[in-house]
Image: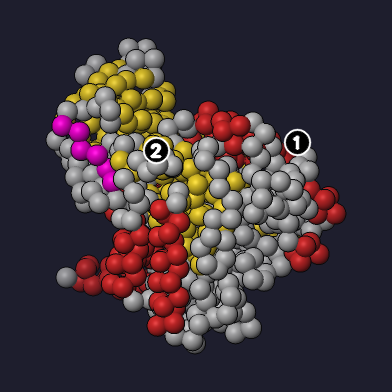
Amino acid sequence: MKRITATLCMAALAVASYAQQWAPVGENIRSPWADQVDPANPLPEYPRPQMVRADWQNLNGLWNYAVTEAAAESFTAEGKILVPFAIESSLSGVCKRITKENAVWYERQFTVPKKWKGKNVLLHFGAVDWHAEVFVNGVLVGEHKGGFDPFSFDVTPYLKKSGKQTLQVKVQDSTDNGFQPRGKQCLINRSIWYTPVSGIWQTVWLEPVAPAHVNNYYVVSDIDNGTLDFEVDAQTADGDLVKVALLEGGVGYSAEKPSQVVLSEAVVENGKAQIKVSDVKTWSPDSPYLYGVRVWIERDGKTVDSVDGYTAMRKISIVKDKTPNTYKRMALNNEPLFQFGPLDQGWWPDGLYTAPTDEALLFDIIKTKEMGFNMIRKHIKLEPARWYYYCDLYGLLVWQDMPCIGDHNKKQMPARDPEVVAAVLNKWSSDSFFGGTDCVIPQEWKDNYYREWTNIINAFKNFQCIVVWVPFNEAWGQFDTPAAVKLTRELDPTRLVNAASGGNYDQSAGVEGFGDILDVHHYPCPAMNIFERKFVNVLGEYGGIGLPVEGHTWEIARKWGYGKNKNNSEEVMTQYEEYLDMLKVFVQTGCAAAVYTQTTDVEGEVNGLITYDRKVIKVDMPRIAAGNKAVIESMPE
């Protein structure tokens, strides 16, 4: 009993020590989950539901940090920062901004478990914004440029034989005064432009693997023929067999605790395998059935490496409806489906890009589902892999935007260098096929955009919830649209391409060059100001009904919405339902999908269905759910 008591006392002292070194910073509002953040173990969940291994080590927690000049090659720690929250965020415990003249340094120590002896040790980063240089025991092991895509390094050659290992990360970020994809981050914050996010903002973790191991896999379903086609990337030795298996799943299936019932298996040859699926169960928002997947390497009858994940049988395609006009519609599993959902920006008042907890990450998805929506447009931001897993699990379609590399808002230009201003000052033609211009993008910018977009698609295309890729938004940084569409199709021919959501409609290369979808934006009421029968026509943004809720706004001075702000929830619902009635008319005349702005308030914007701190839902839930479902069901067969 004395030994147990001593252990409990030591644990209590450790928790107290962490609390003394960290606390949220700033006076802005916070979400209910801010108080649940454990500085000793933040975001402890396994970060990669599509590639689960049992053994791993989470490196989230308090790290040493310092802000230096960009050219600095070393640093002296000036305090503690809570990883994985961006340095500008409240939950980082720092809340400092950096510019292109700075670098932010991170440092922590870790110990490699003895049971990992003989294994290769992989160091994983969910996301770091933007240019990361990674050092282990003082040696540069690699660098990565890209604020939204995951990356990893095999750090085995850089580890000491025993004892504590030192990990350092140097990060530089220009935000909007540079050429990297950055979404809505801006050095000047107003209206729809938000606080910068720099540095580590997703989970950092270690994983032991055998020298022969699975690097990745990709699954494509064919519901018409009842097959699953696997592509597997694995490091193997002569004589090794790579195998794949399909496991029983079901609604509520967990990728982290997969079923052990094997339905079928196959041997991978030349990196490919096919499994025939009997009694196909398709995935949809009404029935999000997930199958388990296992990929492993076998040597002399023994498993040397194995990963568990999941997939789904689902198909996204284009069909023509049976009206006299034969409008093009999006079909899920060969059935026309009106896709209706909110613009979801994924920002948090306390964590900025990073949800405070896994429960918080799930909250917006659950509320979106409860509101009767069947789709989410993830707006110029990527999320951690667990977010897409939850969309797969709960049944929500996702349109995935590429974060923009520019915008044509002249009020933002004072914070930017002349060459950056020159590159992004294009002309946006929002309601016409004519008049819009491309950004004058240097080749370095283009190469970087294509590299990160390639990495993003390859990293996230295993998530079946994603049904549409969106390379550009409202002409922000838009360039060479046919080339971007071509690349997107080559990387993933199984999904639809929405080339320019509300942007410039470059049809110079025809339907194949422009994409599958013509996407118009109109605020505040829904409207389809241009229409082209060659495409699936959608309303990619509308609404933005504003309602500031006292005590739940980011700043008193900024309460921005589209049109005059409302005074109460009833006024919001009345306006919302008027827009639904208007939308039903457009559905009958060819509109195939719609996106309402937006899920939550964000900083100075008060046009969310939920407040920025997630503490107040501004709408009547049963009423909005009934209205949204009625719109979805109003589409002609």
Q: Mark 2 or mark 1, which is nearer to you?
A: 2
In the image, is 621 to the left or to the right of 279? Answer: right
Above or below for 493 versus 125: above
Residue 282 on the magenta span: yes
- Give 429 or 375, whichever is nearer the viewer: 429
Above or below for 84 versus 14: above
Residue 320: give its label: 2
Q: Is residue 205 visible?
A: yes
Residue 224 on the magenta span: no
Distance between the Cα atoms at labels 2 and 1?
40 Å
Mark 2: which amino acid?
Lys
Q: Is residue 180 visible?
A: no
Of all residues, the one furthest to the front in this rendering is 324
Q: Which residues are magenta?
A: 279-284
Query: Which residue sits at x=71%, y=64%?
Result: 187
Colour mode? secondary structure
In the image, is 565 to the left or to the right of 4? Answer: right
Indicate the quadrant containing the N terminus: top left, top right, bottom left or bottom right: bottom left
Q: Which residue is mark 1?
A: 443
Mark 1: which amino acid?
Gln
Q: Which x, y percent locates residue 192?
A: 62, 67
- Give 95 or 369, whichever is nearer the viewer: 369
* Label 2: element kind: strand
- Give 517 or 608, whichever is nearer the viewer: 517
Of all residues, the one furthest to the top in this rendering is 239
Query: Which residue sits at x=38%, y=25%?
Result: 232
